[in-house]
Amino acid sequence: MKVYSLFNNFSTSNKELFDISKAWFAVSLAFGIVLGGINSLFFKAFLIAAIAVGLGFLLHELSHKVIAQRYKFKAEFRSFDNMLFLAVIMSFFGFVFAAPGAVMILSRIYDIRKTGIISVAGPVMNIIIAILCLFIIFILDGFSMLSLGISQIINLPLYLSIPIIGFLVNSWLALFNMIPFWQFDGAKIFKWNKLIYFSIVIISAFLVFGVSLLIQKL
């Protein structure tokens, strides 16, 4: 395995780059099938998914990696090949449970605070992406289109469909990852700092539910 040292203790490897590419493609393929179906809309839906969904998943994971490496931990993304295969198969039935992979972190000492900070980076990244997408939607005067169905959104011009799907998916990703048990980010954040945990839950829940309710009242 060849390792590449880049900057500020950040490094990657040919294995990690391959796993990132594999996960990105599989997630984009799965969501492309769900969003567009196997028809003339598929290639457009695949492109939207690659930018709006795949990027959200991978930036979430790579945010964990960047913070972990700032703490001088060894951290690399590894794809879950079985889960990627399952995601693609499930997409033909109209839904996706995507667990594309995770950043594997090696540390001799378990530190609740550092683990919490590393964990919080992922949902925060999804919130940032969702807010940026919402800002783009606002600039383009597309708020009313957030209430459209998925097939209608896919049929919009790319400059509208990408930020709309990006907002919807990244908002859900942030909230979903705050589940406070098992290996979810939320479990580690809750254990570290409950104020930060509930703050992120409230923000992500507002993005998921509150924004659409506000738009309906406008």
Image (cartoon, helix red, strand yellow):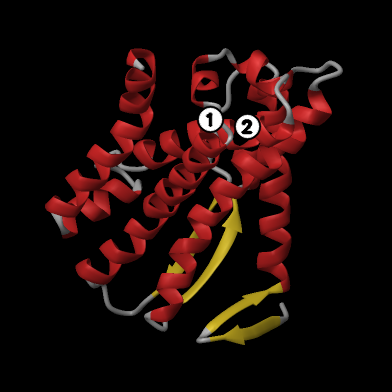
Give how far across and how far down residue 107 sits, in percent: 37, 76
Residue lying at 73% horizontally and 61% vertically, measured from the top left: 18
> Farthest residue toward the right?
40
Give how far across and how far down residue 196 sits, in percent: 19, 53
Q: Quadrant of residue 117?
A: bottom left
Where does the C terminus fall, quadrant-wise?
top left
Kindly state the secondary structure of the residue where label 1 is placed.
loop
Residue 82 visible within the image:
no
Kindly state the secondary structure of the residue where label 2 is placed.
helix
The answer to whether marks 1 and 2 mark residues whose Cβ atoms lie closer than 8 Å is: yes
Q: Tell me the residue that label 1 is attached to.
A: 97
Q: Quadrant of residue 122?
A: bottom left
Q: Residues within 10 Å of mark 1 (few under 14, many from 20)?
A: some
Residue 183 to residue 165: above or below: below
Q: Amino acid at mark 1?
A: Phe
Where does the N terminus fall, quadrant-wise?
bottom right
Q: Amino acid at mark 2?
A: Ala
Residue 213: mark in rendering: none
Determine the CA span between mark 1 and mark 2: 6 Å
Q: Tell me the residue that label 2 is attached to.
A: 87
Q: Residues within 10 Å of mark 2 (few under 14, many from 20)?
A: many
Q: Nearer the viewer, residue 177 or 43?
A: 43
Residue lying at 28% horizontally and 47% vertically, measured from the top left: 186
Give how far across and how far down residue 86 sits, in percent: 63, 32
Q: Decide which of tag 1 and tag 2 comes sooner along the chain.
A: 2
Q: Quadrant of residue 76?
A: bottom right
Residue lying at 68% horizontally and 48% vertically, measured from the top left: 24
Is residue 118 left or right of 192 when viewed as pictured? Answer: right
Residue 39 to residue 173: above or below: above
Residue lying at 59% horizontally and 37% vertically, measured from the top left: 163
Give how far across and how far down residue 21 sits, in percent: 72, 55
